[in-house]
Amino acid sequence: MVSIKAPRGVRDILPEESWKWAFVLKTASEVAQDFNYREVHLPIFEQTELFARGVGDTTDIVEKEMYTFEDRGGRSLTLRPELSASMVRAYLENRMDQRPQPVKLWSAGPMFRYERPQKGRYRQFWQLDFEAIGSQDPYVDVEVIALSVELFRRLGMKGLDVVINSVGCPMCRPVHKEALQSFLKPHLSELCPTCQDRYNRNPLRILDCKNPTCRAITDNAPDTISYLCPECKEHFEGLKAGLDALGLHYSIDNRLVRGLDYYTKTAYEVLSGELGAQNAVCGGGRYDNLAEAIGGKHTPGVGFAAGLERIVLTMEQQGCSFGKEPALEVFVVAVGDIERKEALKLMHEFRKAGISADMDFNGKSFRAQLKVANQMGAPIVCILGEEELKAGKVSIKDMETGQQVEVPLEEGVPFVRTKLGE
Ligand code: HAM
């Protein structure tokens, strides 16, 4: 065993699990295609400023969770904690405003946050991220929510709750903020230290604090929806009407404010009872001022990101199907030098024919090779012994029934193909 271990909060995704990831990624790509979202691959590190300005410097992410480092040229870079800011940066930088709007993009890959690790929360985790940039139509918000629900439906996930809210815009938020602060003022000393700190800098976040005392205090606090300006109100009505039209079930959660500063109007999450404290399978919303915050021209946008680990965890706990696990189909057994060379050739023929094949590379005995074939779960074993080779034949053994037949060497591949199809 090596004494150097993987850093705290990160995981190795081994073959037993990686095929499940591949299934989720393939399904995401199919759903993306059906909703007309195109895949992009963006850098894993960006200029620190992108996140400081985009995600917001009073957020937990920017204040305490970023992996920031200086490169050899003295630039401050950060491993991406999320994708929306990068997506908008890429949109602006590549002049995607010249394309038909909204530009719909998706991407999957690792994100990095220095959080306290627990079930469903890691320091390196994967997100599936979908963004529609360049439209303020509430039906795009509807589409984004519908896309996430359709993804989870295709994955067979059950019992998920969609919760929505509207967090307003720079027009209506200051009025709500003031009302919230005056409501909280008499209780300031009773709030948890984090919320006391948030009182001046980001009081909205006090609404989603999990501390029971803070929750009791904020039970009757002014909610954002009651303070929406006419434009935000109309947008929220449009969102609800669109969701209703599609028959998508949701509930309104006044406490849902999300942990990133860029949100305007729509905020939403999809929750799973299977996940414990970290119960959000996905989260998203609208970010109409993000492009401006990072120095671009005003460009509305909306999207969501889903945690891949959390999807797989939920699917495992719900007994969902991940499709067919990749499996070895044929193991070719041979002992002597000449036989091994023939085995190598036969194995290659199988592979070229699209049949998953393998052989021993460790000089094992005949019996030991059969054992390995069994351990690897190969349903068929091809045996190339001295006798067989002399006769230009190969023995084909059905590992389930134990039955063995000899066929001419050149008929090995078609014979096995037929057998596998049975
Ligand atoms: P977020 O809520 O910070 O939003 O993350 C989205 C999802 O990523 C969460 O719902 C969760 O499934 C997963 N996730 C977050 N942190 C972790 C972690 N430490 N370990 C495992 N999974 C995690 C965003 O990132 C926004 N960029 C979403 C968005 C896209 N909004 C608009 N467009």
Image: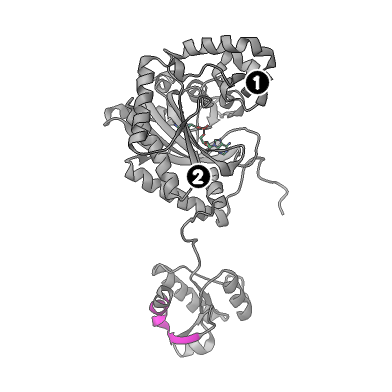
Where residue 296 sits in the image (x, y, percent)?
38, 20
Left-right relation of 152 to 98:
right
Asked if the magenta segment contains residue 223, the reply would be no
SS at mark 1 in the image = helix
Disc assigned to residue 194: 1
Q: Residue at x 41, y 20 (%)?
A: 289
Residue 183 image position (x, y, % from top left): 58, 11
129 or 351, which lies in front? 129
Task: Name the residue rendered at 40%, 80% in the picture.
Answer: 415
Report the residue at 39% width, 38% height from top: 248
Name the residue tied to disc 2: 159
Asked whether residue 113 is in view, the answer is yes
Magenta segment's dominant SS is helix
| Three-letter residue code for mark 2 | Gly
Specify the segment rendered in magenta: 404-416
Residue shown at 32% from the left, 41% from the top: 36
Pick the residue in front: 147 or 224: 224
